[in-house]
Amino acid sequence: MTPVLVLTGGTTDRAAHYRSDTAWIAARLADGESGVLPVWRDLSLVDEDGGASPSVLRGAAATQLLAAAEDSAFLGLDDRGRALFAASLPLATGEALCRAWAPAAAFKDLAKLAPVLDAAGGALLAYARALLRWHRHHRFCGCCGAPTESSNGGHLRLCTNAACGERQFPRTDPVVIMLVTRVDACLLARQPAWIAGLYSTLAGFVEPGESLEEAVIREVREETGLSAVAVTYIASQPWPFPQSLMLGFRVEVRGGERLAFDTAEIEDARWFTRDDFAALRQSGIRLPYRGTIARSMIDAWLAESAALSSRRPEPAIGR
Ligand SMILES: [Zn+2]
Protein backbone atom coordinates (compact mmCIF):
# COMPACT_ATOMS: atom_id res chain seq x y z
CA MET A 1 0.00 0.00 0.00
CA THR A 2 1.32 3.48 -0.81
CA PRO A 3 1.82 5.38 2.45
CA VAL A 4 -0.09 8.61 3.00
CA LEU A 5 3.15 10.24 4.13
CA VAL A 6 6.43 8.71 2.99
CA LEU A 7 9.03 7.81 5.65
CA THR A 8 6.27 7.31 8.24
CA GLY A 9 4.60 4.05 9.23
CA GLY A 10 7.63 2.21 10.61
CA THR A 11 7.09 -1.24 12.09
CA THR A 12 10.48 -1.68 13.79
CA ASP A 13 10.14 -2.27 17.54
CA ARG A 14 12.73 0.19 18.86
CA ALA A 15 13.09 -1.95 22.02
CA ALA A 16 14.79 0.94 23.84
CA HIS A 17 15.18 -1.12 27.03
CA TYR A 18 17.95 -3.14 25.32
CA ARG A 19 20.08 -0.11 24.44
CA SER A 20 21.82 0.01 27.82
CA ASP A 21 22.23 -3.78 28.04
CA THR A 22 25.77 -4.00 26.70
CA ALA A 23 25.96 -7.81 27.05
CA TRP A 24 22.73 -8.24 25.06
CA ILE A 25 23.92 -5.79 22.37
CA ALA A 26 27.31 -7.58 22.12
CA ALA A 27 25.57 -10.96 21.78
CA ARG A 28 23.28 -9.65 19.01
CA LEU A 29 26.24 -8.11 17.15
CA ALA A 30 27.85 -11.56 17.10
CA ASP A 31 24.89 -13.91 16.66
CA GLY A 32 24.75 -14.04 12.84
CA GLU A 33 20.96 -13.63 12.93
CA SER A 34 20.98 -9.86 13.34
CA GLY A 35 20.47 -7.69 10.28
CA VAL A 36 22.68 -4.78 9.24
CA LEU A 37 21.52 -1.78 7.19
CA PRO A 38 24.55 -0.14 5.59
CA VAL A 39 24.74 3.61 4.99
CA TRP A 40 27.58 5.06 2.94
CA ARG A 41 28.05 8.76 2.08
CA ASP A 42 24.52 9.37 3.44
CA LEU A 43 23.19 6.90 0.84
CA SER A 44 21.04 3.88 1.77
CA LEU A 45 21.61 0.37 0.43
CA VAL A 46 18.50 -0.96 -1.35
CA ASP A 47 17.55 -4.08 -3.27
CA GLU A 48 16.03 -3.09 -6.59
CA ASP A 49 13.69 -6.05 -6.98
CA GLY A 50 11.09 -4.48 -9.23
CA GLY A 51 10.62 -1.62 -6.75
CA ALA A 52 12.96 -0.90 -3.87
CA SER A 53 13.35 -2.24 -0.35
CA PRO A 54 16.01 -1.88 2.34
CA SER A 55 18.91 -4.27 1.81
CA VAL A 56 19.50 -6.07 5.12
CA LEU A 57 22.69 -8.15 5.38
CA ARG A 58 23.14 -11.01 7.85
CA GLY A 59 25.68 -13.66 8.85
CA ALA A 60 29.25 -13.26 7.63
CA ALA A 61 28.32 -10.16 5.62
CA ALA A 62 26.88 -8.47 8.71
CA THR A 63 29.94 -9.39 10.79
CA GLN A 64 32.34 -7.93 8.25
CA LEU A 65 30.32 -4.75 7.73
CA LEU A 66 30.04 -4.14 11.47
CA ALA A 67 33.79 -4.69 11.88
CA ALA A 68 34.51 -2.17 9.12
CA ALA A 69 31.88 0.39 10.23
CA GLU A 70 32.93 3.82 11.48
CA ASP A 71 29.76 3.93 13.57
CA SER A 72 26.96 1.50 14.28
CA ALA A 73 23.72 1.75 16.21
CA PHE A 74 21.04 -0.63 17.45
CA LEU A 75 17.80 0.24 15.65
CA GLY A 76 15.45 -2.29 17.28
CA LEU A 77 13.79 -5.61 16.47
CA ASP A 78 12.24 -6.66 13.18
CA ASP A 79 8.86 -8.43 12.90
CA ARG A 80 10.55 -11.76 13.70
CA GLY A 81 12.26 -10.41 16.81
CA ARG A 82 15.73 -10.24 15.21
CA ALA A 83 17.98 -7.31 16.07
CA LEU A 84 18.63 -4.63 13.44
CA PHE A 85 21.71 -2.44 13.35
CA ALA A 86 22.65 0.52 11.17
CA ALA A 87 26.29 0.66 10.07
CA SER A 88 28.09 3.69 8.65
CA LEU A 89 30.70 2.42 6.19
CA PRO A 90 34.07 4.06 5.39
CA LEU A 91 34.06 6.52 2.50
CA ALA A 92 36.91 4.77 0.67
CA THR A 93 35.83 1.13 0.95
CA GLY A 94 32.13 1.06 1.87
CA GLU A 95 30.70 0.68 -1.61
CA ALA A 96 33.12 -2.09 -2.64
CA LEU A 97 32.43 -3.99 0.60
CA CYS A 98 28.71 -4.01 -0.05
CA ARG A 99 29.12 -4.86 -3.72
CA ALA A 100 31.03 -7.98 -2.69
CA TRP A 101 28.29 -9.17 -0.32
CA ALA A 102 25.18 -7.85 -2.08
CA PRO A 103 25.92 -7.49 -5.82
CA ALA A 104 22.26 -6.84 -6.70
CA ALA A 105 21.92 -3.96 -4.24
CA ALA A 106 22.88 -0.32 -4.79
CA PHE A 107 23.39 2.78 -2.68
CA LYS A 108 20.65 5.35 -3.33
CA ASP A 109 19.59 8.77 -2.12
CA LEU A 110 16.66 8.25 0.23
CA ALA A 111 15.18 11.66 -0.63
CA LYS A 112 14.71 10.50 -4.24
CA LEU A 113 13.80 6.93 -3.37
CA ALA A 114 11.11 7.76 -0.81
CA PRO A 115 8.13 7.75 -3.24
CA VAL A 116 8.73 4.13 -4.30
CA LEU A 117 9.46 2.62 -0.88
CA ASP A 118 6.75 1.01 1.21
CA ALA A 119 5.96 2.63 4.56
CA ALA A 120 7.98 0.29 6.78
CA GLY A 121 11.00 0.28 4.46
CA GLY A 122 11.09 4.06 4.08
CA ALA A 123 10.72 4.65 7.82
CA LEU A 124 13.51 2.18 8.64
CA LEU A 125 15.95 3.75 6.17
CA ALA A 126 15.10 7.24 7.45
CA TYR A 127 15.79 6.12 11.02
CA ALA A 128 19.16 4.54 10.09
CA ARG A 129 20.31 7.49 7.99
CA ALA A 130 19.37 10.09 10.58
CA LEU A 131 21.02 8.27 13.48
CA LEU A 132 24.29 7.59 11.66
CA ARG A 133 24.57 11.12 10.35
CA TRP A 134 24.19 12.39 13.90
CA HIS A 135 27.13 10.19 14.98
CA ARG A 136 29.32 11.48 12.18
CA HIS A 137 28.65 15.10 13.12
CA HIS A 138 29.14 14.72 16.87
CA ARG A 139 32.57 13.10 17.17
CA PHE A 140 33.83 15.88 19.45
CA CYS A 141 32.40 17.49 22.54
CA GLY A 142 30.95 20.95 21.96
CA CYS A 143 31.87 21.97 25.53
CA CYS A 144 35.54 20.98 25.89
CA GLY A 145 36.58 19.73 22.43
CA ALA A 146 37.58 16.22 23.59
CA PRO A 147 36.53 13.21 21.45
CA THR A 148 33.15 11.64 22.23
CA GLU A 149 32.33 7.93 22.21
CA SER A 150 29.16 6.07 21.34
CA SER A 151 27.12 4.60 24.18
CA ASN A 152 23.65 3.23 24.91
CA GLY A 153 23.48 1.12 21.75
CA GLY A 154 24.40 4.14 19.63
CA HIS A 155 21.72 6.45 21.08
CA LEU A 156 24.06 8.57 23.19
CA ARG A 157 27.54 10.07 22.80
CA LEU A 158 29.64 10.68 25.90
CA CYS A 159 32.54 13.09 26.25
CA THR A 160 35.73 11.12 26.99
CA ASN A 161 37.07 13.92 29.21
CA ALA A 162 36.08 12.74 32.68
CA ALA A 163 36.20 16.30 34.04
CA CYS A 164 33.54 17.30 31.46
CA GLY A 165 31.26 14.26 31.03
CA GLU A 166 28.93 16.04 28.57
CA ARG A 167 26.19 13.78 27.16
CA GLN A 168 24.82 14.30 23.66
CA PHE A 169 21.59 12.74 22.44
CA PRO A 170 20.50 12.32 18.80
CA ARG A 171 19.14 15.58 17.44
CA THR A 172 16.07 16.31 15.38
CA ASP A 173 15.41 19.85 14.15
CA PRO A 174 11.77 20.98 14.18
CA VAL A 175 10.62 22.68 10.99
CA VAL A 176 7.15 24.19 10.59
CA ILE A 177 5.63 23.75 7.15
CA MET A 178 2.46 25.69 6.37
CA LEU A 179 -0.29 25.69 3.83
CA VAL A 180 -1.58 29.27 3.88
CA THR A 181 -5.21 29.59 2.81
CA ARG A 182 -7.90 32.18 2.39
CA VAL A 183 -11.53 31.58 1.53
CA ASP A 184 -11.07 30.09 -1.92
CA ALA A 185 -7.33 29.91 -2.62
CA CYS A 186 -4.12 28.62 -1.13
CA LEU A 187 -0.69 30.19 -1.29
CA LEU A 188 2.28 28.40 -2.84
CA ALA A 189 5.78 29.76 -3.29
CA ARG A 190 9.07 28.79 -4.87
CA GLN A 191 12.69 29.27 -3.84
CA PRO A 192 15.33 30.18 -6.43
CA ALA A 193 17.30 26.94 -5.84
CA TRP A 194 14.36 24.64 -6.60
CA ILE A 195 13.92 22.77 -9.86
CA ALA A 196 12.16 24.79 -12.56
CA GLY A 197 8.43 25.20 -12.08
CA LEU A 198 8.22 23.73 -8.57
CA TYR A 199 5.88 25.52 -6.16
CA SER A 200 5.26 24.37 -2.60
CA THR A 201 4.11 25.41 0.84
CA LEU A 202 6.08 27.78 3.08
CA ALA A 203 8.45 26.29 5.65
CA GLY A 204 11.04 27.38 8.18
CA PHE A 205 13.03 26.26 11.21
CA VAL A 206 11.62 26.74 14.68
CA GLU A 207 13.92 29.12 16.58
CA PRO A 208 15.11 28.75 20.18
CA GLY A 209 12.56 29.97 22.70
CA GLU A 210 9.66 29.78 20.27
CA SER A 211 6.48 27.71 20.27
CA LEU A 212 5.43 25.95 17.08
CA GLU A 213 2.49 28.33 16.66
CA GLU A 214 4.74 31.36 17.13
CA ALA A 215 7.15 29.97 14.54
CA VAL A 216 4.29 29.50 12.05
CA ILE A 217 3.00 33.05 12.54
CA ARG A 218 6.52 34.54 12.30
CA GLU A 219 7.48 32.56 9.18
CA VAL A 220 4.25 33.50 7.36
CA ARG A 221 4.77 37.16 8.26
CA GLU A 222 8.48 37.17 7.28
CA GLU A 223 8.05 35.32 4.01
CA THR A 224 4.80 36.83 2.72
CA GLY A 225 3.86 39.84 4.86
CA LEU A 226 0.51 38.17 5.67
CA SER A 227 -1.11 37.98 9.13
CA ALA A 228 -2.24 34.57 10.37
CA VAL A 229 -5.66 34.52 12.04
CA ALA A 230 -5.95 30.76 12.66
CA VAL A 231 -3.24 28.12 12.99
CA THR A 232 -4.19 24.43 12.99
CA TYR A 233 -1.79 21.51 13.43
CA ILE A 234 -2.23 18.80 10.77
CA ALA A 235 0.49 16.09 10.94
CA SER A 236 4.24 15.49 11.09
CA GLN A 237 6.82 13.74 8.93
CA PRO A 238 10.44 12.80 9.64
CA TRP A 239 12.64 14.40 6.98
CA PRO A 240 16.23 13.31 7.63
CA PHE A 241 17.80 15.59 4.97
CA PRO A 242 19.72 16.13 7.07
CA GLN A 243 17.83 15.93 10.37
CA SER A 244 14.45 17.64 10.27
CA LEU A 245 11.03 16.82 11.62
CA MET A 246 8.41 18.54 9.48
CA LEU A 247 5.42 19.78 11.49
CA GLY A 248 2.53 20.56 9.18
CA PHE A 249 0.02 23.38 9.80
CA ARG A 250 -2.90 24.95 8.01
CA VAL A 251 -2.84 28.74 8.35
CA GLU A 252 -5.77 30.98 7.57
CA VAL A 253 -4.77 34.57 6.85
CA ARG A 254 -6.59 37.86 7.11
CA GLY A 255 -8.43 38.80 3.92
CA GLY A 256 -7.47 41.88 1.92
CA GLU A 257 -3.73 41.96 2.72
CA ARG A 258 -1.27 42.27 -0.14
CA LEU A 259 1.43 39.67 -0.70
CA ALA A 260 4.84 41.17 0.09
CA PHE A 261 7.24 38.26 -0.11
CA ASP A 262 10.84 38.25 0.98
CA THR A 263 12.79 38.06 -2.29
CA ALA A 264 15.94 36.86 -0.52
CA GLU A 265 14.20 33.59 0.30
CA ILE A 266 11.31 33.42 -2.15
CA GLU A 267 11.44 33.90 -5.89
CA ASP A 268 7.69 33.93 -6.38
CA ALA A 269 4.53 33.39 -4.34
CA ARG A 270 1.02 33.10 -5.75
CA TRP A 271 -2.52 32.38 -4.74
CA PHE A 272 -3.91 29.28 -6.48
CA THR A 273 -7.63 28.64 -6.82
CA ARG A 274 -9.00 25.19 -7.50
CA ASP A 275 -9.34 26.09 -11.19
CA ASP A 276 -5.67 27.12 -11.27
CA PHE A 277 -4.75 23.63 -10.04
CA ALA A 278 -6.74 22.05 -12.85
CA ALA A 279 -4.58 23.96 -15.36
CA LEU A 280 -1.20 23.48 -13.63
CA ARG A 281 0.28 21.11 -16.18
CA GLN A 282 -0.32 23.51 -19.07
CA SER A 283 1.25 26.36 -17.10
CA GLY A 284 4.47 24.39 -16.44
CA ILE A 285 4.01 24.43 -12.66
CA ARG A 286 4.73 21.31 -10.63
CA LEU A 287 3.90 20.36 -7.08
CA PRO A 288 5.94 18.38 -4.51
CA TYR A 289 5.59 14.62 -4.99
CA ARG A 290 2.78 12.63 -3.40
CA GLY A 291 3.68 11.44 0.06
CA THR A 292 5.36 14.69 1.14
CA ILE A 293 3.53 16.55 3.87
CA ALA A 294 3.39 19.62 1.60
CA ARG A 295 1.58 17.71 -1.17
CA SER A 296 -0.69 15.98 1.31
CA MET A 297 -1.85 19.33 2.74
CA ILE A 298 -2.40 20.74 -0.77
CA ASP A 299 -4.43 17.66 -1.80
CA ALA A 300 -6.52 17.82 1.39
CA TRP A 301 -7.30 21.49 0.73
CA LEU A 302 -8.25 20.70 -2.88
CA ALA A 303 -10.62 17.94 -1.75
CA GLU A 304 -12.26 20.28 0.76
CA SER A 305 -12.45 23.05 -1.79
CA ALA A 306 -14.14 20.72 -4.29
CA ALA A 307 -16.68 19.64 -1.66
CA LEU A 308 -17.42 23.26 -0.75
CA SER A 309 -17.82 24.42 -4.34
CA SER A 310 -20.33 21.65 -5.03
CA ARG A 311 -22.52 23.21 -2.35
CA ARG A 312 -22.19 26.90 -3.28
CA PRO A 313 -21.22 29.07 -6.27
CA GLU A 314 -17.49 29.89 -6.39
CA PRO A 315 -16.59 33.60 -6.28
CA ALA A 316 -14.11 34.87 -8.90
CA ILE A 317 -10.67 35.59 -7.40
CA GLY A 318 -7.54 36.86 -9.16
CA ARG A 319 -3.93 36.22 -8.17
ZN1 LIG B 1 33.56 17.50 26.97
Image: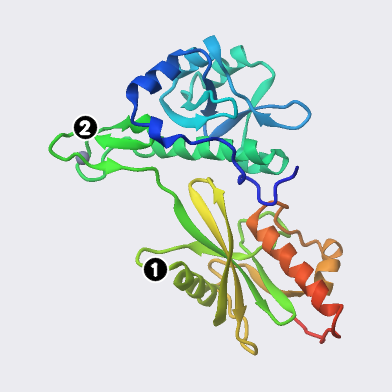
Mark 2 is surrounded, within 10 Å at the Cα level, by few (under 14), some (14 to 19) or many (20 or more) other residues, namely some
Residue type at the position of mark 1? Glu
Q: Which mark is residue 210?
A: 1
Residue 67 in sight: no
Q: Is residue 194 above or below residue 26?
A: below
- Sequence order check, earlier mark of 2 and 1: 2
Residue type at the position of mark 2? Thr
Residue 149 x, y percent position in the rendering: 29, 30
Q: CA distance from mark 2 to mark 1?
A: 33 Å
Q: Going by the picture, which residue comes out furthest to the top?
A: 60
Secondary structure of the residue carrying tag 2 is: loop
Residue 250 x, y percent position in the rendering: 61, 70
Residue at horizontal 70 percent and vertical 59 percent from the top: 198
Q: Quadrant of residue 148?
A: top left
Mark 2 lies within 8 Å of ligand 1 (Cβ measured):
yes
In what quadrant of the picture does the N terminus appear? top right
Question: Where is mark 2, residue-wise?
Answer: 160
In what quadrant of the picture does the C terminus appear? bottom right
Residue at horizontal 35 percent and vertical 67 percent from the top: 209
Q: How many marks?
A: 2
Relative side of 272 to 210, left or right: right
Q: Is residue 256 above or below residue 165?
A: below
Q: Is residue 115 above or below residue 212?
A: above
